[in-house]
Amino acid sequence: MARMHARRRGKSRSNRPLVSENPSWVPIGEKEIEDLVVKYAKDGVGSARIGLILRDQYGVPDVKLATGKTITQIMGENDALSAIPEDLSNLMRRAISLNSHLKENNRDIANRRGLALVEARIRRLESYYKANDVLPSDWKYSLKNAELMLK
């Protein structure tokens, strides 16, 4: 698939094997996986990081195969989701760091363009989440509000 802000193609990568049921060698059960997801989510760990922890430390290759639900669905059922989706908050953190860099290095034109591209992605995600009722319709991105929300 092509990149969003460049005319180059993306990197090739391997595909996961097509598996429709949980492997028999998974060491922990469905209830323990859900408890671990809730525990890590309440500690402030993001869903992507929770998946990595479960894979690397507990030997769970796929949470959806093991439980029938995604990590985000489990977090939502147990009221452990944050107000802002994880991908949007990560982009806002990146925009904040680029802006602080530009305050010190105001002639860095490449990073100024990078900030514009990140903010374009944020606005695109904002409209998507508003259309799917994840964010309220009056939510608006600005750099000052992002700094207040995330710090």
Image (cartoon, rainbow, N blue to C red):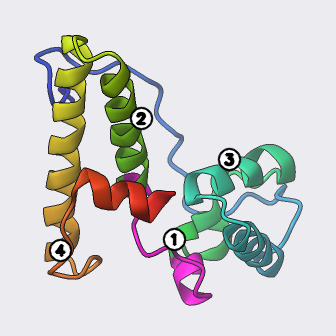
| Image vertical order of residue 144 relative to residue 14, above or below | below
Q: Which secondary structure, mark 4? A: helix
* Residue under pointer 1: 72
* Cα gap from disc 3 to disc 4, whole angstroms: 29 Å
Q: Which quarter of the picture shows residue 21? A: bottom right
Say whether disc 3 or disc 2 marks the residue closer to the N-terminus: 3
* Cα gap from disc 3 to disc 2, whole angstroms: 25 Å
What segment carries the magenta color? Answer: 73-87
Residue ID at (65%, 75%): 67
Residue 120: percent from left, percent from top? 14, 43
Q: Residue 59 lies in magenta, yes or no?
A: no
Q: Which quarter of the picture shows residue 139? A: bottom left
Say whether disc 4 or disc 2 marks the residue closer to the N-terminus: 2
Residues at discs 3 and 4 in contact (Cβ within 8 Å): no
Amino acid carrying label 4: it is: Lys
Amino acid carrying label 1: it is: Thr
Residue 66: percent from left, percent from top? 68, 68
Observer-nearest residue: 105 or 12? 105
Mark carried by residue 52: 3
Residue ID at (38%, 25%): 101
* Residue under pointer 2: 97
Q: Residue 83 lies in magenta, yes or no?
A: yes
| Image vertical order of residue 114 relative to residue 128, above or below | above
How many C-alpha atoms fall within 10 Å of the one at disc 1: few (<14), some, or many (≥20)?
Answer: some
The answer to whether residue 121 is left or right of residue 90 is: left
Residues at discs 1 and 3 in contact (Cβ within 8 Å): no
* Residue under pointer 4: 130
Residues at discs 3 and 2 in contact (Cβ within 8 Å): no
Q: Which secondary structure, mark 1? A: helix
Amino acid carrying label 3: it is: Leu
Residues at discs 1 and 4 in contact (Cβ within 8 Å): no
How many C-alpha atoms fall within 10 Å of the one at disc 4: few (<14), some, or many (≥20)?
Answer: some
